[in-house]
Image: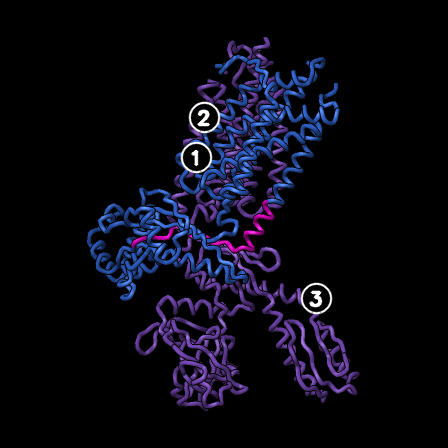
Chain colours: A purple, B blue
Amino acid sequence: MKKELRWKILLVVGLIALAIFLAYPPSKKIKRGLDLKGGIHLVLQVISEDAINVETDLEIARFQELFRKNNITFQTAVKEKPGRFTLQGVNPDQEGKTRDLVDQYARDWDYAFVSDRVTFSLKQPAVLALKDQAVNQTLETIRNRIDEFGVAEPLIQRQGNERIVVELPGVEDPDRVKNLIKVTAILEWKLVRGGPAADEAALLQSSGGKAPEDMEVVKGDPKRGQGGLYLVDKIASITGKDLRSVRRSVDEWNNPAVSFTLNSDGARRFEKVTSENIGKPLAIILDGKIQSAPTINGRISESGIIQGRFTLQEAEDLVVILKAGALPAGIKYLEERTVGPALGSDSIRQGLMAGLVAIVAVMSFMVFYYKLSGLNAVAALILNVILLFGALGYFHATLTLPGIAGIILGLGMAVDANVLVFERIKEEQAAGKGILSSISLGFSRAFSAIFDSNLTTIISAVFLFQFGTGPIKGYAVTLIISLLANLFTAVFVSHLIFDVAIKKTTKRLSI
Amino acid sequence: MELFKTPHIRFLKYKYLALVVTGIIVLAGILNVTIGKGLKLGVDFGEGTLVRVVFKEAISVTQVRDMLKAVGLGNSVIQETGRKGREFQIRTMEVVRTGAQEQEIEAHEQLGNRVIEALRGRGGQAETATATPDLNTVDQKTLTALLEPAFSGKGEEIAQNIVSYRNQNGIIGDFSELQAAGINPDATNFLKANTYLGKLTVLSRETVGPQVGKDLRRKATQATIWALIGMLVYIAVRFKLAYGVSAIFTLTQDVLITMSIYTFTNREINLPTIAAILTIVGYSINDTIVIFDRVRELTKTLRKEPLETIMNAAINQTLSRTIITSGTVFLTVLALFLFGGEVINDFAFIMLIGTIEGVYSTIYLSCPVVLFWQKIFKTKTGFKK
C-alpha cells in the first residue's frame, strides 16, 4: 500500500474516533431542543421603564431632603413622567446655591431653570444604564428563583435590549413555574387602619370619603380568602428586604404557612411596631394584595409566620420567591410555548422512525442501483452522520425539529454528491476509459458541480444563521455542518475507498 | 445498472409553454391568497393560541366543537391528529385586539385556559374540591409524596413508572392499564382509591404575542433576502450574472408554486413550513447548479453549437442524475410524511410538492431564463476559452 494512502486512512479513522468520542453517548452529549424533549420556552419583556420610575421617585425624595438641609425653599415637586420632574416655587435668589447643589449631587440629571422652576431630566446614558441594570437584575432574580425551585439545565439569557428568554427543559408543571417567574414579589407588612369593607364608600365613610394622606386602600386577595377592601398605612412597617431567612412551615392549625426571621434592623422596627399596636391587625401584602391580616397578640421581634390559607405548593412557591427576592421591574410575556413530555417523546419516536425508514430506503436503493459502489456511498453517508453528531456534540448545539430538517437536506445532498460522481464514472467508462482513470476522472469532473452546489447552499445557510431566529438558526447549523462534512466524505473518503478497493488488476467495476 | 440510455429530448422546445404553466399556477396562488382563502398564518407568527390535547376516550370533532361552542369558541380550528380519535389540535381564532400587547397575550392565555376548561367539562370538579389529584396530570414529586406513606421506599419507583408510562402513551385511559406499566395490584388499588383519571391531558400549548410574531416575520424576510443575495453573488462569480439571476428566478418560482399549492390545502404557515421551503430552495439550487456546471463544461467542447443546443445536451446528460437524486429525496420525504407524525407532517407535505416541482423547474426554467436574458440584453452568455 502506498504511503500516502496509509496517511489518508489514518486521518479518516482518527476523525471517526474523535467524532464518536465527542458524540457518545448521544443522550448526554447531544442536547435536544424543547420541541423534542418537552419543557417551557418563554420570552419575557422587562418593563424597564419601571426602574426609571422608581429612580425618579427616589431622586425627588433625595432632593426634597437635600434642599431642606441646605435651607433652599421650594413649594412642590411634580413628577411629569418617569425620568423627568420639576421643583416648583424655588426662590430665584437662591438660584446660584441651587445650581451648586445640583452640580454636586445630581450628575446623572440635566436641569433647566425657568423663573422659579427647576426641571430635571435624567440624562440619556443614565437612562440606558438604569434600564440595562434593571434587565440584568431581573434576569438574576429569575435565575435565582428557578435555581431555588430546582430545574435541571435551565437556559436564561438576555435577548436584545429588554427581552429575556427562559428555556426550562422537562418541567412537568408549566403553569406553576410561569407564575413563579412572573410575580413581582414585593412583600410588605402594613398596619390596618380600617376594614375589611365591601366597597370604598363604606371603607372611607369615617374619614370623609377620602383616604387620609398617609394611608391607602388595598384589596384583599380572594385566593387567600381575604375578601373586601382594607385601609392601611402607606409606609410599610417592614418589607421583604428585611427578611433574613424564610422556610415552609405550618401554623397552629397545621395548615401550610411560611415562617421567617428578620435581620437586626428589621427586627428592631418590627418589635417597635408590634409592641405599640397590640390588639390591632397587621396586613401582610404581596404585590399589592393582602394575604392575611392577623391581629398582633404581643411583641414580636425576630421571627414570625405568614399565614394565608396556602396549599402546600403555594407555600413552597412563596418560599422560593421570597428567597430569590423581588423583581426590580415588571415583566410581561411576549411568547410562551409549553411542550408536554408526552409530545416530546412522541416527536422523537416518530422522527427516529421516519428517519430510519428514510435512511434504510435510500441506502438500499444505492446498493441496489450501484451495487458494490453503492456500499461505498453508504459508508460515506454513515460517516457523514457520525461527523455531524460529533460536531453537534463539540459545539454544544441543540437538536430541534427544524434541525432535523437541515440534516435531511444535508444527507440528500450527500447522496447527490455520490450520484454525481458515480454517474460521471459511468459516462467516462461509456466513453471507453479504463477503470482507474474513469474513477479518477469521475471524481475530478464531478467536483466542480459538488463544490459549487454545496458552497452555494452553505452561503445561504450562513446568512440564515446570521439573520434568522431560534428555529431557523437550528436549521442553518445542522445544514452547514452536514454540508461541510459532505465535502469531506463524498469527495475525499469515497475516493479513498475506491483507491483502497480497486487494484490495477481489477477487471470490472461494480457500479 | 442504468435507468435509461442518455436521452435526446429537446426540453427547451417547451420553454414558452413552461413559462405559461408556471404563470398560471402562481397566478392561481396569488388569487387564492388575495381574494380566496388567504394565507393562513399559524401560531408561530403571532396569531392566537394553539392547544394540543389527548383524551382518555375517543371523541368526534363534532363533539369537541360542541363543547367549545358552549363557551363561545365554536369558530376554533379543530384538527384530529392521531391516537385513533383521541388526540386533537385546537387553535382559537378569536384574535384579541385590545391594543396593549400585554393584555393581548394574557387574553390569548385565557382563551387557552377556556378551551381546556371547556373540554374538561364537569369531570373532575368533585375530585378537585376534595383535593384528590388527577393521575393524568399530577407531577412525579407530588405522586411520590402521595405513595411514599403507603409504600415505604417504593413510592419513587412506582411514581416514576407511572409517569414514564403516561409520557409514552399521552394519557392513562383506565386503571387496568397500570398493570402494563408494571404496577402491582396493591398500588393500583391504592391509586384507585386516592386519585382519579382526568378526562384529558394537555400535550402542548403555544401562545406567541403579536410583537414576537412581527419580529419573526421581519427576521425571516430579512434572512431570506440576504441568503438570496449571497447566492446570486456567488453564482454570478462562479458562472455569469445571467446564471445567477436565473437561479434566483428559478428558486423564487419554486417558493411561489409550492406556496400556491399549499394555500389550497387547509394547512397553516408556521416555522417548520419556512424550514421546508428553505430545504426546497436548497435542493432546487443544487439541481440548477449541477445543470449549469454541465453547460459550463460543454461550452468548452461544443464551442460551435448555439447555447440552446448545449443546454439541451446538458439537461439530457444530467437527467439520470436528476431523477435518481430527486427520487431518493422523494423517498426520504415520503417516509417522513407517512411515519413522521403530526408535528413534522406539514413539513413533509411541502417537501413532497417541492421535490416534484423542483425537477420541473430546474429542467424547464433555469436554462430558458438564461436564454431569455441573452435575448433581452444581447449579452454573450456562453463561456469563453
User: Which residue was labeled with disc 1?
Assistant: B336
In front: A320, or B319? B319
Quarter occupied by the C terminus of chain B: top right
- A115 sits left or right of B181 in the view: right
- B326 sits left or right of A254 in the view: right
Q: Nearer the viewer, mark 3 or mark 2?
A: 3
Secondary structure under the numbered disc 2 in the rendered image: helix
Which x, y percent locates residue A106? 71, 76
Q: Is residue B208 magenta?
A: yes
Q: Chain of mark 2?
A: A
Q: Residues within 10 Å of mark 3 (few under 14, many from 20)?
A: few
Secondary structure under the numbered disc 1 in the rendered image: helix
Residue A124: mark? 3
Estimate the spatial distance between the alpha carbons at disc 3 and disc 1, rounded to whole Å. 54 Å
In front: A310, or A332? A332
Q: Residues within 10 Å of mark 1 (few under 14, many from 20)?
A: many
Which x, y percent locates residue B229? 67, 38
Estimate the spatial distance between the alpha carbons at disc 1 and disc 2, rounded to whole Å. 16 Å
